[in-house]
Image (spheres, rainbow, N blue to C red):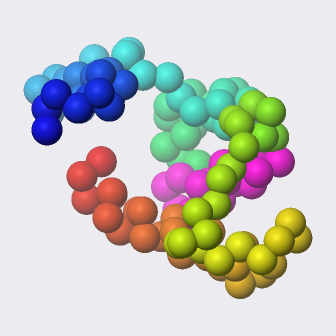
Amino acid sequence: DHTAPFWGELKEVVDLRKMVQTQSAKDVLTHMTLPDKWLELNYDLAEVSNAVYDEPPCYWQGILLRDMLRDMGKYGPMVVDDKIIKWRGGSVEFIDGVIMTHDICLWSIMHVGNYN
């Protein structure tokens, strides 16, 4: 449904995606900013490319997730849907915490990576 309200919220993303398909990366990157983690490390795009080149899948995504969980004031609260992940309280559990988060990260790379 192209008239659904969420399309207005995604307009910038859709427009940038169209640019990626028709323009050079150099031109498109002038419209995008690097994530805060890279800016905190004072990385430019070339340094980001070198950092992720030979890292295992989800290494940097895991760091971002860790930062999101530590600094909820910056990113807002992380809400876990109990229908998807059975969260067992406030403590971090290894299987339901670290392993599940890594599994979600790998799943997203496998499914989104083909189109991104």
Residue 36 in the image: state x and y as whole percent: 65, 31
Is 18 displayed left or right of 113 in the figure? left
Task: Name the one closer to the observer, 78 or 62.
Answer: 78
Magenta-span inclusion, residue 110: no
Is 101 displayed left or right of 49 in the figure? right
Residue 60 placement: quadrant:
bottom right
Note whether 28 is above or below 115 in the view shown. Answer: above
Note whether 91 is above or below 60 in the view shown. Answer: below
Residue 57 in the image: state x and y as whole percent: 52, 67
Furthest residue toward bottom: 95
Number of labelled discs? 0
Is 48 displayed left or right of 12 in the figure? right
Residue at x 23%, y 32% (from the top left corner): 4
Residue 89 in the image: state x and y as whole percent: 83, 71
Secondary structure character of the magenta stretch overall: helix
Residue at x 13%, y 38% (from the top left corner): 1
Residue at x 36%, y 25% (from the top left corner): 9
Task: Name the one closer to the observer, 82 or 16.
Answer: 82
Is 113 displayed left or right of 45 in the figure? left
| Residue 45 appears in view | yes
Residue at x 81%, y 40% (from the top left corner): 71
Task: Name the one closer to the observer, 63 or 75.
Answer: 75
Residue 48 in the image: state x and y as whole percent: 55, 40
Note whether 25 is above or below 113 in the view shown. Answer: above
Q: Magenta region: which residues?
A: 52-70
Note whether 4 is above or below 15 in the view shown. Answer: below
Residue 2 placement: quadrant:
top left
Residue 15 placement: quadrant:
top left
Magenta-span inclusion, residue 64: yes
